[in-house]
Amino acid sequence: MQWESWSAFWDMGGAGAFVWGSYGVTFALVALELVLVMQRRKDTVKRLLRWRRAVGKDGSGRLGAAQLESEQ
């Protein structure tokens, strides 16, 4: 499509508010989703690191001799 001017482009034949509003809401929701995903990833990494420290580095759930001595 071709428009005569920028104002005609932004107005889009009277549907500009709906079109640009839809783009705005979509952009805001995508940005919110990205922020929430980054926050969930950060929390998950922290939880996994905490779990790894709790079960020990070998994953057996048993503490090694060096770890036992350091905890006493």
Image (cartoon, rainbow, N blue to C red):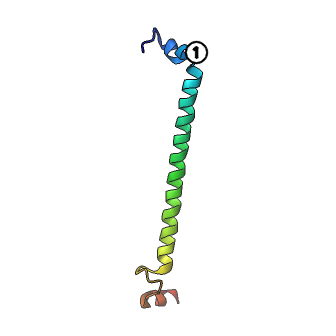
Amino acid bearing label 1: Gly
Residue that numbered label 1 is attached to: 14
In this view, the residue in front, 45 or 3, is: 3
Residue at 52 percent of width and 67 percent of height: 47
Picture coordinates of residue 7 (x, y %)? 52, 13
In this view, the residue in front, 12 or 72, is: 12
Quarter of the image for residue 25 reads top right
Q: How many marks?
A: 1
In this view, the residue in front, 38 or 65, is: 38
The extreme top residue here reads 4
Picture coordinates of residue 2 (x, y %)? 42, 12
In this rendering, the answer to whether 31 lies above or below 50 is: above
Q: Residues within 10 Å of mark 1 (few under 14, many from 20)?
A: few
Q: Where the N terminus falls, by quadrant?
A: top left
Picture coordinates of residue 51 (x, y %)? 50, 74
Residue at 51 percent of width and 63 percent of height: 44
User: Quick one: SS at disc 1?
Assistant: helix
Residue at 45 percent of width and 86 percent of height: 67
In this rendering, the answer to whether 50 lies above or below 27 is: below
In this rendering, the answer to whether 24 lies above or below 8 is: below
